[in-house]
Amino acid sequence: MDEQEERALHLDELLSAVHRVAAPGTGDLDCGTPGHPAGHICLAPSESIDLSALQEELGGRYGLPRNLAMGGFPDPGATARTGLPLLAPFGDRIMEMRGWAYADRWIGCGSARAGDDVRLVVLVAERETPKADTAEPTSWVDGVVAVTGWDTSRLRTYDWTAVETRLGTALPSDYKQLAEIFGNGAFDGFLALQTPDAPCASSDIVRHTEWLGEWARTRGSELWRPYAVYPVPGGLLQWGSTEQAHGFYWLTEGPDPDRWPVLVTEDVPDSWVRFDGPTAEFVHRMLTRRDHPFSTARYFDTHWFESYESESQP
């Protein structure tokens, strides 16, 4: 085995260890390192592993990280909700730290001083459970923010006038709020939200709507029976999807987008499920209700949003 193959093997072994420790239901985390607080486990990465390569691999699996420390300066606003448990074990020795929320865990990698050296550090820490349900949320959007523990300081700006002009229709107001707050990514790593200006055409609500409408026009809309596909009046306009081939649509019936029902299909005949309520309510109930037909609450007690954006995106 040459040096490159050995590095790749060590990286794969570390990523497997991270995933095992971060998996829901793995119990309490106890590091055992003298001076370290409870509630986390430090893993032992090989010295051959490159920090940037590890960050890239973790980003590919868990989405856009939060930058918690850079150049020896930790984020002064970091809290238990936004990733502080990944900084706490290292105190003023921390040099760099990136963190990912994953169910009831934080995953972190970075570097810290160890005597005269700076060493790679990798850890999994317990994540404070966001408010899991809101009996009477201020709004359904606020409820989704609360249940995911999402940091709302990085709002996106979209030219909605241009987006809606190109689509030929207004869009639901709560969807636009979700897109501005969360951006392109997936709730509980499951329901992927389509947004404007996404790097991938299948994730871009404008380009995907245009492509889907052209597909249905030229090849027929049998896949969506008994419904038509937008821009046919009253047709389906897709706003979300999953890797399991679920499609999440609005039925564009009526002039008021805020009253459009949500329709979901599992990509098999006659599998349509209709929800008469706003988009954000659908997402909130999916995250918090075990009786929801597409519930993630059956599998996770703590919820998160996995961002697919790059750090260069606004």
Image (spheres, grey):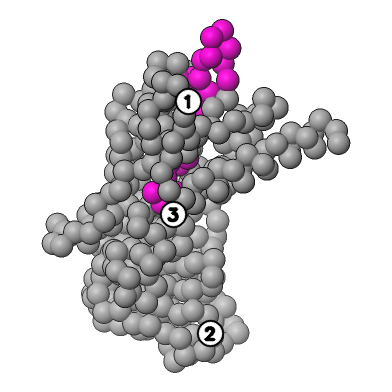
Residue 95: give its label. none
Q: Residue at x 35, y 46 (%)?
A: 156
Is there CB contact under 8 Å for labels 1 and 2? no
Local packing at callout 1 (Cα closer than 10 Å; few below 14, some 14-19, many 20+) is: few
Amino acid type, residue under disc 1 in the picture: Thr
Residue 268: give its label. 2
Please, is residue 41 above or below residue 164 in the view?
above
Q: Which residues are magenta?
A: 94-119
Residue 33: give its label. 1
Quadrant for the C terminus, please.
Answer: top left
How far separated are the C-alphas under marks 1 and 2?
Answer: 51 Å
Is 12 left, or right, of 74 in this rendering? Answer: right
Residue 31 is situated, as x and y percent measured from the top left of the image, at 46, 32
Please, is residue 46 above or below residue 292 in the view?
above
Please, is residue 145 above or below residue 55 in the view?
below
How far separated are the C-alphas under marks 3 and 2?
Answer: 32 Å
Q: Quadrant of residue 186?
A: bottom left
